[in-house]
Image (spheres, rainbow, N blue to C red):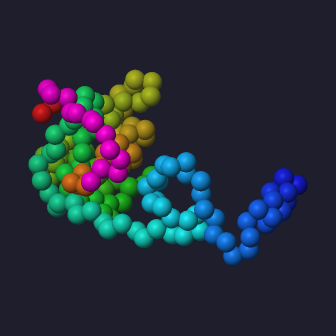
Amino acid sequence: MKYFKTLWVVLLIAVPLGASLQADTGGVSSLRGDLDLDKSAAASDFKTIPDDRKPLHRDYLHQPPLIPHQIRDYHIDTNSNKCLSCHSWGNYKSSGATKISLTHYDARNGQQLSDVSPRRYFCLQCHVPQVNAKPLVGNQFESVESMN
């Protein structure tokens, strides 16, 4: 507690009242932009996700498939999972959806379960919808040739 009191006194001495805090970024621009620390950036627009389309190609081996449809308002918690209403082994044929992989039924110890493994139950940890958005940072990623 003594440390925080000392830090507060140092801040009061070092920063005049009414002055805004300017971060020393070392010349690196953050995703927030060039805003003072006490300012909020405007929220970016929502990206448009097409309603339904064919499964999207994968760019690398073992990439989790991308979600080719809108998922806003999908409910996933410990009691229910909207994804399984179409993608489970019991429902995929009637819904026309892709069935989930057998690997999603494997327990941590390698045992095959009769239901989706708890570690694979929260789909959005790995699977995400894809939009045609400008990359946040530059990169030179090239997809695996054999995947196209």
Picture residue at 41% right of the left edge, 30% below the top:
107
Picture residue at 60% right of the left edge, 62% below the top:
22
Residue 138 occupies which quadrant of the picture? top left
On-image quarter of the N terminus: bottom right
On-image quarter of the C terminus: top left
- Residue 25 % position (x, y): 55, 51
Q: Is residue 135 magenta?
A: yes
- Residue 61 % position (x, y): 25, 28
The answer to whether residue 94 is seen in the rendering is no
Q: Which of 118 and 65 is in front in this view?
A: 65
Q: Residue pushed farthest top?
A: 110
Question: Magenta: predominant secondary structure element?
Answer: loop
For residue 34, side relative to residue 22 (left or right): left
Q: Residue pushed farthest bottom?
A: 18
How many numbered marks does the figure carry? 0
Give above or below for 110 relative to 97: above
Q: Is residue 91 magenta?
A: no
Q: Which of 22 and 102 is in front in this view?
A: 22
Residue 146 occupies which quadrant of the picture? top left
Picture residue at 39% right of the left edge, 45% below the top:
125
Give above or below for 113 relative to 47: above
For residue 29, side relative to residue 63 (left or right): right
For residue 99, side relative to residue 128 (left or right): left
Picture residue at 38% right of the left edge, 39% below the top:
120
- Residue 92 % position (x, y): 17, 46
Give above or below for 21 relative to 106: below
The answer to whether residue 25 is seen in the rendering is yes
- Residue 91 % position (x, y): 20, 48
**Range covered by the magenta-colored residues:** 134-146
